Structures are given as C-alpha cells and as structure tokens.
Amino acid sequence: MAKQDGNSHPGAPRDEHSTMVHEHIVEIVSDSGEGAQKCGVTFGTVSAKMGNGAWTVEIIPAEIKPPSRSRDGASGIRIRLGDHEITNMGDAADLVVAFNEQVLYGRIGQGAYHEGTVVLLENKWANDPSPQIRQAYADGVADFHDRGFVVHELAMEEACLAHTENPKLGKNMFVLGMLCWIYQRDVEMTLGEIAAIFSKKGEQVISLNQKLMQAGVEFARERLTYCFNVPCMDVDHELLVMNGNQAVGLGVMAAGIEMVSMYPITPATSASHYLAASIQSVGGFVHQAEDEIAAVGFAIGCSYAGKTACTITSGPGLALKMEFIGLAVMGEIPLVIVDVQRGGPSTGLPTKPEQGDLMAAMYGSPGDSPKPIIAAATIEECFHLIITARTIAEAFRTPVIVLTDAGLATGVQPIPRPEPCEEWLAPPVDQSPWKQGVPPYDWDEETGLSPRPIPGQRGGEYVLTGLAHTGQSKVAYDPASNIKGLEMRSRKLAALRATLKPPKIHGDDEGDLIVVGWGSTLGSIEEAVDRARADGYRVSSLHIRFLWPLEPGLRDIFMRFDKVMTIELNYSDPQHGLMMETQPGRPPHLALMLRGRTRRDIDYWSICQGLPLRPGQIHEVIMDRLHGMGLTGNEPQPVEAAMGSESCSG
Amino acid sequence: MFGLKKDWSLDVLPRYFTLEDYEGAIARWCPGCGDHAVLAAVQRICRDEQLLPEKTIIVSGIGCSSRFPHYMKTYGFHGLHGRALPVACGVKARRPDLHVWVATGDGDCCSIGAGHWLHAVRYNMDMTVMLFDNNIYGLTKAQTSPTSRPGQRTNTHPFGAWLPPLNPTLATLGFTNVSFVAKTVDWNPVHLHATLDAAFKHKGFSFVHIHQRCPQYTAKIYEAMQQDPSTILLLNHENGIQLDPAVAGMYEHQMAHDPLNHNEAVALAGREDLLPIGIFFQNESRPRYEQVTTIGMEMTTEERIAGLNRELDRFAI
Ligand code: SF4
C-alpha cells in the first residue's frame, strides 16, 4: 500500500522540468489488438497504488476485428488521474498516444481532445510503402497542428525493434514506459505489475516486456522535454481496482446469491463472465440459459425452491423477461434482476451507456406491477446495492431491479475494500414445519408483507399462481380478491418507502438551482456543480438511488430551490423549437416521474449520444440555466492552464 | 402407519400417506376429459412411493392441463404459458431433494415453449414431464395447436388446419442427451400408470407423451383408437413396461422393443399405420445437469466468506 505525503512518489524518477498538475487525462488509442488496454490498465493500477485518484475506461470499437487504420476501429483506453478522488472520465484528454492518425480521428469525432492536447504519434506511416498511407499521414499531421494539438511524431515502433521482432505486440509496454516517465510513475512498482500480468507466460515474456518498458522510459527521457507531476494522496485503507460489472459480480457473491441465470448480452455479459470464473469460490453456479426468458424463469424456479438467485441482463433482455418479472410480482417471488443499460431502442448501441430503461423497468410488465427499482451511481454501489437488493427481495418477497449502465460496467476505479460479513449472505433455506393455519400469503394489512413457505416445509404446501388469487393462493376472479391482491403488493412499496431516508444534498440545502440525477452520472454532475459553486453560484445537486419507491422528502427539498432540473443520459425532445411551442415535448424518464410524484415543475436536460455525460457538458447546461434565470456568480477566476505550456515543444 | 420391508420385518413409519393426502381442489376439467385419468395416476404413484407432499412439486404452464397443480395437495407452480420447463429446471438446480413433475400441453410445450423443450431434454434434469396432447388449445377455446391434424377445423382455421402436425415423440427422440421417451394414452389407466411410474423412477428427464382426449373440442380424434385396440401397437420388453397379461391381451399388435435401441425407437415413433405405446427409449447413463448445478451447495458460511475474501484479494492493488 502506497503511503506518503510528499508531492511526488519516492520511487518516481525526478525531473526538474516537471509541471505540477492537479489532474490529467491520458489516452492511448490504437487499432484493436495492439494492447493499448493492457498498457492503460497497468498505468491506472500503478497510479492508484501510488495514491492518485484514477478512473479508467476502455475505448471499445463496435466490431470485433475492425480493419486496421480505420476511424471506427479506434480502440484503446482513457485514464484520468488526479490528486483527488476521480469519479468520471472527465472532458477532453490532455495527452494521447496514438498508434496511427486514423484512430485519432475516430476519437476527435467523439470530442475527446481540445486545443493544446499533446499528441504522441507513431511516425512510421511517413515512410509507408503505400503512397496513400504516406499522404493520409502527412495530411493528418498537418491537420492536427491546425487544430492546435501539440504534436510529437515519434519512432516508437522502430525503437521497439531493438528489443523485439514483433513490435506490434510489445509496443504497449514501451508506451507504458513512456507514460511512466511523463508522469513520473514508480518504475520498480511498474516492473512488478508487469511481472504480475505476465506471470503465467513465463520468465522470458516477463523480462522482454520489462525491457520494453524500461526502453520506453529512456526513449521519453531523451526526446520529451517536459513531464508532469500529479501529487499523490494519503491512502490509509486497502483499495481494490475493478469495473462496475466486476463489482456487480462480487456483490452477487457477497450477497450469498447461489444461482446466476443469464443469457449472453452486451454490456451485461462481462459480469457473468467474471462470475462464471469465480462463483465456485463461494459455492454458487452460473447457468447459461437457452434464452433470456428461460434465464429469468430458471432463476425464479430456483428462488421459489428457496435458493437465492439473480439474472443479469441489458435492455433487450429486460424486455424479454418482463412477463416473468410480472409473475414474480404476482406470485411474490424474491429475485434480483440486474439491468446493465445500453443504448436503445432495439439493438441500439450495445456497447454504449444510456439511462433509457427506467420506464421499462417500472412499467414494462403489463398490469400493475410494482417492484423496487434501485440505481447504482458508482462502481462501489454496484457492489453494495446487489446486497441491498437481495435483502429487500427476501424481506419484501418481491423481485428487485438494479439498474447500472455501460459506463459503470466498463469504468475502472479504485474503491475501498469491503469487509464481507455473514449478514450479507442469504440465510440458509428454512425447512422447519410451516405454522399451521397460516396461509401462503398471510398479508399484513399495513405493510402487505407476509412470510413465504418454501418447498420442503411441511404443512406449507401451496400452489403459486400467476392468476389473481386469495391469501390462500386460490385462484379468484371476484373483484374483492383482485383489489386485495393489488393493494397488498403495492403496499409493500409504501412499507419500503417508510424505511428510506431523504437523499443527501450535494451543496447547500437551498439555492437557485438543484440538479437531480440518477445512476452513473453522479460523478460528472457533482463535478460540474462544484465548478459552478466555486464560481459563486448557488447550485446544489442530489442523486436518487431508490427510484421505486421514490426516496422521501423530495418535494420539501425542491421547495427550497427556485429551479429544479434533472440531468439524464437518455432521450428527451428539445424544449424549444419544432412543434414544442404549442405542445410540450417528451421529457426524459426521471423528470417525467418526478413531475408526477412531487407535483413540481421539473425542468430537464438530457442527451443520448452513446457517450457518458462529461462534467464540462453538464457545467455548460447549468450555466445556461443560471444565466437564463438572470444570475451571475463571482467574477470567474482565471483558470490556470492544465499544462505548463511554455515547456512544451510543438 | 406400518410398512412391510422386503425382509418381512415391520417398519413403523412416522407418517403414512393415503391418496387423500395428495388430493387438492376438486378438478374442474370437463367431464370425460383425459386429464382426470392422469391426475389419478399421479396421485397413485405419489401414494405408492410415499412421496413427502412437502417435497413434491408440480410445475405447469398455462392451458387446461396446466391447472394440474391446483388439484394436488403438494407444492405447485402454475406459471406462464410455455415456461414450465425453465422453472422446473430452476427448482431442481439447487434442490435435488425435491420430486419435480411437470404438466404441459401441446400448445404450451411444442409451440410457445418449444425452445425450452429441446434444451430441457438436453439438460436432462431428474423430473417427470407429462405432455398432455389433445391436438387443440382447449382453455382459449379451440385454436389450432402444433399437433392438430390437417383438415381439423378450429377457430383459427375454420376451413381446416393446413400444416402437417408436429410429432412430439419423434422430435424428443432427436434431441441431444435424451434419456427417457414414452407414449401412453389416457384411456388405458393401467398402461398410463405403468408408463408414468417408469418415468417417475427413471433418473433423468422423463418425457411422457400422453394422448389425451378432449371431449369438448376434439372428441373424434382418438375415438377410433379408443374403440379399436387393433390400431395400437403395444411395446413391451423386460427393460420396458410389462403389462398384466389380462390388459396386454386386449392388444393384438404387440412388439418387444428394447428401450436402449434408439434407431428402432425413432422408426417406431415415425410409424403412421399403428400407434405404438410404451417406452420408446431409456438410457440412464446420460449426464444430468444437476450433477454440476449442485456443486458447492454444502459449503459453509465460513468457507463462503473465505472464498469471497480470496476473490476480493484478486482486485487488491
Ligand atoms: S376443454 Fe378439453 S382439454 Fe380442456 S378440460 Fe375440457 S375436455 Fe379437457
């Protein structure tokens, strides 16, 4: 565990030219298969170990094997590191290592860079046998200069050739070495990481990769005239580094869920991949079902028989599971359903984040189908909310939907190590005789709660049915029984709501504007709000985890702000223009829900680009709203350039 | 309260179950519906085997026959149309101690739930699956089912069904990892009982195709067969079903068929001249999915927490 209080790490190379920065965003982009991700993950891990806040996110092309040197094929990784906790991927990158100019264009198209971004570009294309490639490269370099990038054309591959015959495979470790020098990472620690990554491949591979890494350090030292120092924080607790899907997987195991029943779907599947490789450590099983419907049905069967089960899916899979989820509501079967949201509708954007499933989760099952819905806002919550969901599912005898998204699924962040305890695990199956005379749905009038007979419990025999039924689970078509069942199932949500606390406000308890969000946008929203607050604006935010039942106290909180707006990562109609002047456009999910539930006029802004929300984007929206309200903050302080520009050579 | 053991010693049973102990609500099928006979046979097997009612589960889908669990006094799961098999497999996955029966119809199993059918056969989990085949959708009032015969008039094909019917026995024999396939008829209670009994005792996924009369909508289709036993080919074998000679004597066409002979089973299932009944195929050596789904069940809380800590360690930096 790294522990120190100085500005730079003792193991790091020191350079008098280093510029101190509070944070930096680095990207490595390449054709797929060039190992950029391995390089970035190692860089992120070393940074986290040294005590930097870090957020790592993979840049994934939509195709498995896109053609090389193609814009759509841009593959790679972004690492945002800072001297404080980093909760999101940030805005434009400060430095990028690009293996060809075309993949860089792929990222330019996604707004990944700004004027001043340092580009370390592989230059072998300048001498390519193909005249088209030479031309494309030359054009690219000229254009990058025009865009204001600080371009360094570097013979990285050539330098690797001194150490390996196949630089395409080893270049990533060479680049890792370069980054080690640029950010003054602990070289010994990095060598150790390399040894760990390649431990299964043998000594020869380890030492080759270590050699390449060290060559990268030297290469950068000789050619680059500047480097950066991102001060480290004190780390006094153990840290784990993982992505949101791994956190979901660990949460499933920590919750004592024995059966994971799934069908492959992006971006949820990597959670099941992780579980398939690991759940045997806790005695569980991953069932790959024949389809999404069977996956949830199998989990329901397992749960009906008293064993805890979950199913993990994404939007299209959630749609297919809806009839069964309705049955679980009707028959009051505990079940955890994880929906890792992606872009929709239909096949949509399978690898991209969107918060488009809230309404489907709430109302996707026909008829009245109340069930708790909770949304994870951080990677850490991806872990803990699964345990919460499992507990609620059993205590309230209900399916529970946990929403995460592709952004959380692929984002990697250090989180404090959780301490597993027995209470997290599901209790063993109760096989004691069922109390005589107690019906299978012995609903408590006030809460709708009832104990559940489990097969094997003598005297508890009942037939679970999806038909309307009495407390005895007898099919009943009469109005009174139907109303009773509906009320009892709905009352459980009211009972759960009574246990919830009002959400914490980020910022002051009252002010001009409060921004309301849910899910993966937490980090970006709070960062944007902090920026506005630093400029003297009276802005706060709050983030909702319990969407159904809705966390209490919202109306009171909203009353204390002049304006309430949601910021969401989903589609809404523009509020002005088109035909919206005469008829209001369609608001996004949370705004629509909050309007109904709090009877307040809720403003909104949402976007659906297939990209995570960036703090800069949100900041702009906030400023736009505040200016629209006629408000001005303090004179904004001139912000120091993130880079020491005078020491950069173009 | 008493049971006689094989060695003639007397065993005092703490609990003894009569037929009544398995009888739930009064069955509401139409008078003369073949489902009544199947219910009686299952209740008899439960009684004969002294199955603990609390350890017995009937899982069903939606349809006339899927009302089955309501008429038993065991645990039951009356779920969704077509989805009995995934639920039943899920029940069995971590509860191998439970006796699982599945009631499903020709629409439920062979149409809306057909995808699950072939995979459940492949999973080969220990359960007894009864396909109630009346060639029609009864509950929703006479729509064509996948086993409806060409020319059969239904509400969805008032001028007669057109497509050739699906042959569930033949299809099941073709699914990978099949381990038990039998066919019986509801109107011969002795054969029905013997078949279901063999199916229940088979370790694995036992698929029993039951030709079931629906006097309400398809009164005619099994009439000839019922009245004329010479339309039926009785399969018997020392490894299969051996009926009481008094009952077997009814059938002029009989054949010794070894249930291990898959090729012959396929040929029999495809026969159109006679309706073969009995065990077509049985092989207990096929892998059963619960051999792996149950792994780790005995792990203690301490072991689980230790395992979890090891997993967390893998992410430590
Ligand atoms: S409609 Fe046919 S299958 Fe349904 S209960 Fe009546 S006779 Fe039986």
Image (tube, coloured by chain):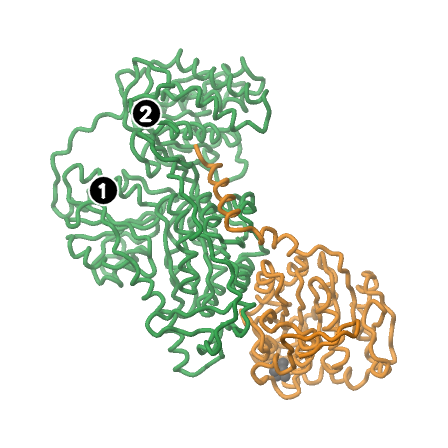
Tell me which corner region of the image, top left, top right, bottom left or bottom right, holds residue A640. top left
At mark 2, the secondary structure is: loop
**Between A500 and B296, which is closer to the camera in this rendering?**
B296
Tell me, by letter, which chain the rendering colours green. Answer: A
Q: Chain of mark 2?
A: A
The residue sitting at the top extreme is A222
Q: Is mark 1 within 8 Å of ligand 1?
A: no
Pointer 1 local density, CA inside 10 Å: few below 14, some 14–19, many at least 20: many
Amino acid carrying label 2: it is Gln
Q: Is residue A211 above or below residue B38?
A: above
Q: What percent of the width, then of the height, locates residue B109?
A: 63, 68
Which image quadrant shows ligand 1?
A: bottom right
Amino acid carrying label 1: it is Val
Position of A266 with respect to B142 (left or right) is left
Chain B's colour is: orange
Q: Chain of mark 1?
A: A
Q: Nearer the viewer, mark 1 or mark 2?
A: 2
Pointer 2 local density, CA inside 10 Å: few below 14, some 14–19, many at least 20: some
Residue to which mark 1 is pinned: A529
Q: Is residue A213 above or below residue B270?
A: above
Residue to which mark 2 is pinned: A4
Visible residue check, residue A577: no
| Image quadrant in which the C terminus of chain B is located | top left
Q: Is residue A417 above or below residue B133?
A: above
